[in-house]
Amino acid sequence: MVAATLKEALDGLQNSFVITDENVFRFWGAEIGDLPVHVVAAGERSKSLTVYDGCLQWLASQRATRSSTVVALGGGVIGDLAGFVAATYMRGIGLLQIPTSLLAMVDSSVGGKVGLDLEAGKNLVGAFFPPDHVALCMETLATLPVREFNNGAAEVWKYGAIMDEALFETLEARPLGPGDERLPEIVVRSVDLKRQVVEDDEFETSGRRASLNFGHTVGHALEVVTGYGPLLHGEAVSIGMVVEAAIGERLQMTDGGTSQRIARGLASQHLPVRVPGVDLATVVDAMRLDKKATAGNLALALLDGFGSSRLVSDVPESVVLECLRENL
Ligand SMILES: NC(=O)c1ccc[n+]([C@@H]2O[C@H](COP(=O)([O-])OP(=O)(O)OC[C@H]3O[C@@H](n4cnc5c(N)ncnc54)[C@H](O)[C@@H]3O)[C@@H](O)[C@H]2O)c1
Ligand SMILES: [Zn+2]
C-alpha cells in the first residue's frame, strides 16, 4: 500500500513496537509519536545475534504479547532484523514493514525472507515470514543518501531487464531520481514484478525465483572478493548484470548488444559498470562456492531475450572467465 506520509502509516497503531536504526530515527523519529521505539546502530553489523537478542529483551521488557505488532522502520537491514524478531518472538507476532530505502521498498520487503548474518557468512539464519502489511512512504526517500538511492535503483533496472522491457525503456528515457514524480508507479511496478515471481515459487523450490538472481552470481562474487567494502550490493550487481548479459551473448542466448545497452543505462544511473584490478581467477573461485554451481560448470540466471530470463545450470567456466576479462 502506498501511504502519503509516514505519519499516516503510523497513525492509530496500537500495541505496536517500532524497531529502527539511528539514521532513520534522526530524520524521521519525530513522526513516531508515542509509540515505543528501539533504535539500533545503522549498517549490516546490526543483523547479528547480539542485536537480535537486544530487540527480544526490549520487547519482553515492554511486555509485548502474541497480539502485538513489530514495526520494521528502515532499510533492508532493519527489515531483515526486525522481521526475524517478529517471526520468532513468542513463535511469531504481527509485522508491519515500512521500508525507507529504495532497495528495501523494491526488494527486501517483498518475498517474506527475514534473517541475520553470522560471522561465517551473510543471511545464514532466517525464516520465511511474510509481513501482515507493507506501507510504502515515498517521502522517506528524500533523506536517503544519493549513493544508497542508486544502489536500490540497480534492482529496478534488473526487473526491467529480466521481466519488463517497457520498464527498462522508461528508465532509459530518464534514470530514476529521488524526487522523481514517477517513483510511486515505478516502485509499485517493481514490487508487483518481484511478487509475481515469489508467488510462483514461494519457498524456492521450482527455480523460478532464481531468475531474480540476474547479475547476482558475479555480483556476489565481487562483493566477497572486494571484502564487502568498496562496492554496495546494488553496485556489485550492476557490474554483474553487464558481465552476465555478455555471457548470455557469448552463449547465443541473449541478443548481441544487450550488455552494452545495459551498461549504458546503469552508467546513466551513476552505477559502476566495471571494477578494474580484481583478480579474475579469485572471482571465478568465489562464484564456484555459489550454492547453484556444479563441478566445472556455473549456474547463472541469464537473459533469453530482453525482458525474459531463466536459470542456466551448465555455463562453462572458460566462458565466464573470458567475459570477466573483457568486461571488468
Ligand atoms: N530479505 C530479502 O529478501 C532481502 C533482499 C535484498 C536485500 N536484503 C538485505 O537488505 C540489506 C540491505 O538493505 P539496504 O540497502 O536498505 O541497507 P540498510 O538498511 O543498511 O540501509 C542503507 C543505509 O541507508 C540508511 N537509511 C535507510 N533509510 C534511510 C532514509 N530514509 N533516510 C536516511 N538514511 C536512510 C541506513 O541507515 C543505512 O545507513 C542487506 O542486509 C541485505 O542482505 C534482504
Ligand atoms: Zn540484490
Image (cartoon, grey):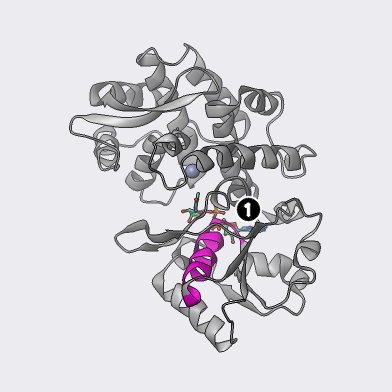
Residue 66's image quarter?
A: bottom right
Left or right of 171 on screen, residue 54 = left
Decide if ligand 1 comes within 8 Å of the CB at mark 1: yes
- The percent position of residue 58, horizontal first and vertical second, equals 54, 83
Q: Nearer the viewer, residue 37 or 24?
A: 37
Can residue 99 be seen here? The reply is no
Eyeballing the image, is 192 above or below 30?
A: above
Look at the image and say whether residue 84 sits in the magenta stretch: yes
Main secondary structure type of the part rendered in magenta: helix
Look at the image and say whether residue 287 sits in the magenta stretch: no
Q: Residue at x 65, y 47 (%)?
A: 146
Q: Nearer the viewer, residue 292 or 15?
A: 15
Residue 120's image quarter?
A: bottom left
Q: Which secondary structure, mark 1?
A: loop
> Split into 4 quadrants, where in the image is the C terminus?
top left
Q: Residue at x 57, y 49 (%)?
A: 110
Can residue 314 be seen here? The reply is yes
- The percent position of residue 252, horizontal first and vertical second, equals 38, 12
- The percent position of residue 226, horizontal first and vertical second, equals 36, 46
Left or right of 267 on screen, residue 203 = left
* Label 1 Cα crowd, 10 Å radius (few <14 / some 14-19 / many 20+): many
**What is the three-letter code of the residue carrying label 1?**
Ser
Q: Residue at x 76, y 37 (%)?
A: 182
For the magenta stretch, what is the residue range?
74-90
- The percent position of residue 188, horizontal first and vertical second, equals 69, 42
- For disc 1, the marked residue is 101
Eyeballing the image, is 280 above or below 56?
A: above
Q: Nearer the viewer, residue 270 or 201?
A: 201
